[in-house]
Amino acid sequence: MNNESYVRKAIEVARRSRENGNHPFGAILVGSDGEVLLEAENAVPSQSDCTMHAETRLVSMASRAYSREQLRGCTLYSSAEPCAMCAGAIYWSGIGRVVYGLAESSLLALTGSDPENPTLDLPCREVFAHGQREIEVLGPLLEEEASDVHVGFWNSPD
């Protein structure tokens, strides 16, 4: 599989998250051999916990299942660019690479001032740039496909 295929898989997880009554975000972890190791949906509404973003849930599971050395060779694929909170979790986990679909700035254009997603306009690259280790970032990829799962979910932008 290639990067686009894995991003599409993360978008499928986001679609399932929405179908399960949560925010439309999904993430998968892919090992250095190309195997999908883990996947996580957003669970903010269902868990009543603002930290239950797809990426933070995935990082939590990955940190318990794999060593930092193993995670260094993994790629986290996300349906949307990791927010500042998620980028911090990714950084601390040791995951070495991030690939995402929808850019944070594009997400902000979709969600507007919806109180369910007070988007931070802070690219994950900028968060990672302030760390002591390098994390490779690729994205946005397939933005139109990645935005489709959000259509009709958020309040209209202001």
Image (spheres, helix red, strand yellow):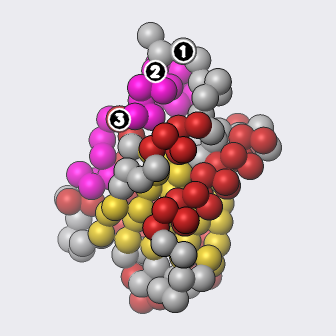
Is 125 one of the magenta-colored residues? yes
Question: Could you tell me residue 22's position as x and y percent?
Answer: 71, 40
Q: Which residue is drawn at 50% across and 25% down?
A: 111
State if disc 2 and disc 1 touch (CB < 8 Å): yes
Answer yes or no: is residue 63 visible.
no
| Mark closest to the chain's N terminus, 1 or 2 | 2
Which residue is at the front of the view, 14 or 124? Answer: 14
Residue 149: which quarter of the image? top right
Q: Residue 112 carries which label?
A: 2
Q: In which quarter of the image is the N terminus?
A: bottom right
Residue occupied by mark 1: 156
Q: Is mark 1 on a helix, strand or loop?
A: loop
Residue occupied by mark 3: 105
Residue 99: which quarter of the image? bottom left
Q: Which amino acid does label 3 sit on?
A: Ser
Question: Could you tell me residue 17's position as x and y percent?
Answer: 71, 47
The stretch of residues the image draws in magenta is 106-127
Which residue is at the front of the view, 125 or 131? Answer: 125
Q: Is mark 3 on a helix, strand or loop?
A: helix
Question: Could you tell me residue 153's position as x and y percent?
Answer: 65, 27
Q: Quadrant of the C terminus?
A: top left
Q: Distance between the residues labelled 3 and 1?
A: 16 Å
Count of numbered tags: 3
Q: What residue type is labelled 1?
A: Ser
